[in-house]
Amino acid sequence: MAASRLEINFVRLLAESESRAGEKRDRDRGQESWRLEQYVAALEEMLVALKKSPSKPSAEMLTDYTRKVDFLKGLIEAEKLSSATEKALANQFLAPGRTPTIATERMPASKTVHMQSKARCTGEMRSELLGIVSSSDTELRHRSVPVDEGQSAAELDAVLQHHNNLQEKLAEDMLNLARNLKNNTLAAQNIIKQDNQTLTQSMRQADMNFEKLKLESERLEQHAKKSVNWFFWLMLILVSFTFISMILFIRLFPRLR
């Protein structure tokens, strides 16, 4: 199925947005960020229109488009954070696209942007920590206290390792939470399935009891009809016998004059 004009324009704007997000520009960074925000806002509007379009792409393509737009939106929000640690942590939870946006890409551009953003955040964290160490070094030098550079590097590595451990622990906690949620969901599904089976068996048993009750009602009705028939013939015989007896009595004992 050929892509519609709306989808072609969406893909072009998405590729341009990913290209701008991957560019490293220190100057005019605020202007580029503002322009990227406008691009992402336009992408969101086009994505909504694309989902409502009669010639919309497949569900997998729409899911990947949504994933890429959400990634760019999350990337912009992460860049607005003040601390490099917060930026690095926010980048950990971003999910880039899984397929290339255009045919000339060997690797999805969003994955490349994600790796560049993570590397940039790590560099900013290191720069911040080095700035802290440098300021401490300056203060100590003003106090005429010698500072061991090897010790400062070890402290920096320790801080980075601490942040990495915190991120790994957070990721592990989220993984455990997702696993527990999945187990609870499966348990609830099993309980609902068992309840449905019990309800089905109860309904089947009720239908069987209804059929048996209907059969017994028919038998009782037939039995009642038979009883009525016997009672009718018995009354007929009794009346006939009484009538014949009265005639014989009149014949045998004539009326006295």
Image: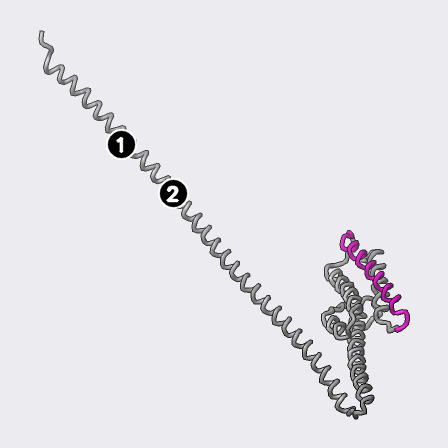
Give the residue drawn at x 90%, y 69%.
28
Q: Quadrant of the C terminus?
A: top left
Q: How would you classify the magenta stretch by its main secondary structure?
A: helix
| Residue with the mark numbered 1 | 230
Q: Does label 1 or label 2 sit earlier along the sequence?
A: 2
Q: Secondary structure at mark 1?
A: helix
| Nearest-to-viewer mark from 1 and 2 | 2
| Residue 18 magenta-highlighted | no
| Residue with the mark numbered 2 | 215
The residue lying toward the viewer, choosing from 44 and 237, is 44
Residue 231, horizontal then vertical, whole percent: 26, 30
Q: Quadrant of the N terminus?
A: bottom right
Residue 241 lies, with reference to residue 173, above or below; the image says above
Q: Residues within 10 Å of mark 1 (few under 14, many from 20)?
A: few
Q: Residue furthest right?
A: 27
Give the residue drawn at x 34%, y 37%.
222
Q: Residues within 10 Å of mark 2 (few under 14, many from 20)?
A: few
